Image: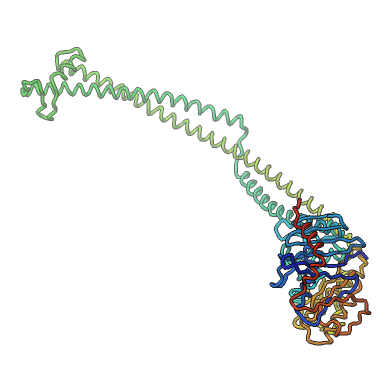
């Protein structure tokens, strides 16, 4: 049988200079006393805690001052594991094979190498990444803690919430040899592929809706003939528009020039008219300042002289006629230019309409072509999506074939169910309510004094199932603390102890209980009994002095600089 067992444990308080050394044997070991509070639980807890499986210590137990060293035998090879706070060291004989302060990155992989065994589980996060579980899962079905283990199945270790409860329970499949790391990786890959298929199916639905909508829109657009023809139709009105805009610009400038000239001549004509009115009224001022008696307009003699000089005429009447002639000519020319401007603007509007129609056709062509390109693009994505789904389905089929190459879980579970039932009956705790409710990965509910019997029946059934499978998976010591805590009956306590001591499918049993000798257990005398008798004083100064050199050496080793 491939197995590991504890050979000894050294516990030293490096501040109080107290210690305890206990040797264990292969097979049955009982730590007992006539009183409580003698340190049985502290010794028990320290065994697997030294191997990196965290446990809950009593408040009186100052874990930060304790150095522990556990010697184990793994198929005939001896190792010593030392722990101080968060630092670990492993010795193989005299060779240092590990010095680390990381359980996850270094201690767990090294123990997996030593045991040839580890548990691999999918983390709770969305990635479902499969990782090597910490040592607590290696020893999970081999330890029942006094404080937590008798209230819930496989719940004795701390800090296990890294994995969801259903995933934690799968650790049993590794201990039964049903699961291996390779299988766990395949299962995780299968889960990821299923998630990927789900995402692809959602994307496929979106793409199909898009392609359908775009196709319907294409059918509602009358496509143009070709891009070259549209370019020609678009270029001609565009050129005409440019020519018209230039011509309109010239006309606009001409209109501005004529309007300015007309305004200037009309102003000068007005000056002549006002001067004539003043001369006729005979009210010109001696100071050469002229005021129109009708409108009150005032102007200097110099302004009138300037107008006369502009037209090279002195006679006011003739001058007025000449300016009126010029004004009328400008007005006629202005009218012609305005008519021309209106006509050009009408042509521009017509050409713009032609251009807009051409542009609409061109846009329709481009839109039609763009929609066809989009449909082609999304149709290609849709095809690729379906191909990927097919590839994922193919991978899942291949994985399923590999997953079938394992022991029959149903057959194994049925064997487990039968053993649980037999054990419960043997402990006189069976009721028909349990029928059909026993599951390998699910605890069987019970209350009060029946709970320890039900929990023990499930632990023992697991070991019996392992033995029946004749699996090559390594087995560990069954370390059980205070199994009679909730029992008031003497006979029930005796039945529980007898079931524990008769487990022979494991390399070692370490049992901690009060008054073991009082029950006359049929252990055949093949038991290593360890007696503790001093309350609140499991460690003592004498042992520390005896092993002071050893403790000092271990302390220097485990606290030395890690690389």
Q: What x and y, as percent, mark residue 159?
A: 72, 65
- The part of the image, by quadrant, that contains residue 496 is bottom right
Residue visible at 5% across and 20% down in the picture? 286
Q: What x and y, as percent, mark residue 236?
A: 53, 27
293 or 204: nearer the eye? 204
361 sits to left or right of 376: left
Residue visible at 48% across and 34% down in the picture? 353
Can residue 167 be seen at all in this image of the molecule? no
Q: What x and y, as percent, mark residue 329?
A: 27, 20
Q: What x and y, as percent, mark residue 6?
A: 86, 67
Residue visible at 15% across and 23% down in the picture? 273
Q: Is residue 376 above or below residue 202?
A: above
Which color scheme is applied? rainbow
- The part of the image, by quadrant, that contains residue 482 is bottom right
Can residue 276 be seen at all in this image of the molecule? yes
29 sits to left or right of 126: right
Residue lying farthest to the top in this orientation: 312
255 or 9: nearer the eye? 9
329 or 280: nearer the eye? 280
Q: How many marks?
A: 0
Which quarter of the image is occupied by the N terminus?
bottom right
536 sits to left or right of 96: left
């Amino acid at each position: 049988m491939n197995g590991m067992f504890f050979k000894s444990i050294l516990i030293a308080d490096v501040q109080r200079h107290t210690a305890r050394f206990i040797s264990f044997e292969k097979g049955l070991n009982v730590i007992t006393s006539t009183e409580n509070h003698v340190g049985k639980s502290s010794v028990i807890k320290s065994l697997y805690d030294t191997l990196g499986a965290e446990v809950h210590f009593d408040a009186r137990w100052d874990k930060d001052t304790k150095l522990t060293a556990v010697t184990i035998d793994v198929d005939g090879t001896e190792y010593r594991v030392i722990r101080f706070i968060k630092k670990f060291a492993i010795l193989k004989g005299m060779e240092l094979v590990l010095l680390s302060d990381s359980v996850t990155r270094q201690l767990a992989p090294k123990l997996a190498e030593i045991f040839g065994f580890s548990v691999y589980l999918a983390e709770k996060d969305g990635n479902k990444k499969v990782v090597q579980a910490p040592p607590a899962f290696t020893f999970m079905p081999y330890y029942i803690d006094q404080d937590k283990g008798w209230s819930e199945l496989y719940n004795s270790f701390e800090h296990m919430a890294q994995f969801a409860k259903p995933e934690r329970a799968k650790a049993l499949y590794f201990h039964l040899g049903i699961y291996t790391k390779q299988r766990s990786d395949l299962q995780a890959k299968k889960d990821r592929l299923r998630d990927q298929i789900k995402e692809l199916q959602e994307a496929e639905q979106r793409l199909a809706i898009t392609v359908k909508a775009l196709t319907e829109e294409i059918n509602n657009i009358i496509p143009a003939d070709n891009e070259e023809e549209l370019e020609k139709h678009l270029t001609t009105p565009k050129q005409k528009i440019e020519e018209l805009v230039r011509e309109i610009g010239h006309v606009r400038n001409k209109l501005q020039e004529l309007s300015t000239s007309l305004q200037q001549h009309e102003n000068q004509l007005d000056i002549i008219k006002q001067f004539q009115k003043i001369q006729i009224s005979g009210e010109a001022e001696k100071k050469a300042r002229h005021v129109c008696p009708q409108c009150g307009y005032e102007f200097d003699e110099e302004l009138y002289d300037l107008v006369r000089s502009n037209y090279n005429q002195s006679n006011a009447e003739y001058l007025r006629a000449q300016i009126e002639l010029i004004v009328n000519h400008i007005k006629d020319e202005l009218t012609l230019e305005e008519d021309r401007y209106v006509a050009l603007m009408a042509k521009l509007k017509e050409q713009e309409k032609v251009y807009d129609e051409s542009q609409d056709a061109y846009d329709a062509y481009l839109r039609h072509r763009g929609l066809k390109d989009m449909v082609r693009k999304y149709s290609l994505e849709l095809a690729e999506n379906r191909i990927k789904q097919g590839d994922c389905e193919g991978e899942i089929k291949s994985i399923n074939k590999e997953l079938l190459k394992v022991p029959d879980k149903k057959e194994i579970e049925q064997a487990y169910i039968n053993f649980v039932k037999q054990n419960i009956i043997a402990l006189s705790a069976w009721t028909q309510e349990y029928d059909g409710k026993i599951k390998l990965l699910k605890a069987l509910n019970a209350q009060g004094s029946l709970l320890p019997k039900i929990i023990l029946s499930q632990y023992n059934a697991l070991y019996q199932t392992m033995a029946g499978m004749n699996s090559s998976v390594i087995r560990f010591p069954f370390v059980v603390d205070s199994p009679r805590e909730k029992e008031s009956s003497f006979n029930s306590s005796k039945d529980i102890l007898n079931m524990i001591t008769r487990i022979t499918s494991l390399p070692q049993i370490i049992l901690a209980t009060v008054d073991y000798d009082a029950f006359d257990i049929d252990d055949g005398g093949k038991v290593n009994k360890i007696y503790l008798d001093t309350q609140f004083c499991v460690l003592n100064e004498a042992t520390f002095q005896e092993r002071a050199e050893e403790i000092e050496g271990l302390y220097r080793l485990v606290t030395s600089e890690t690389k």
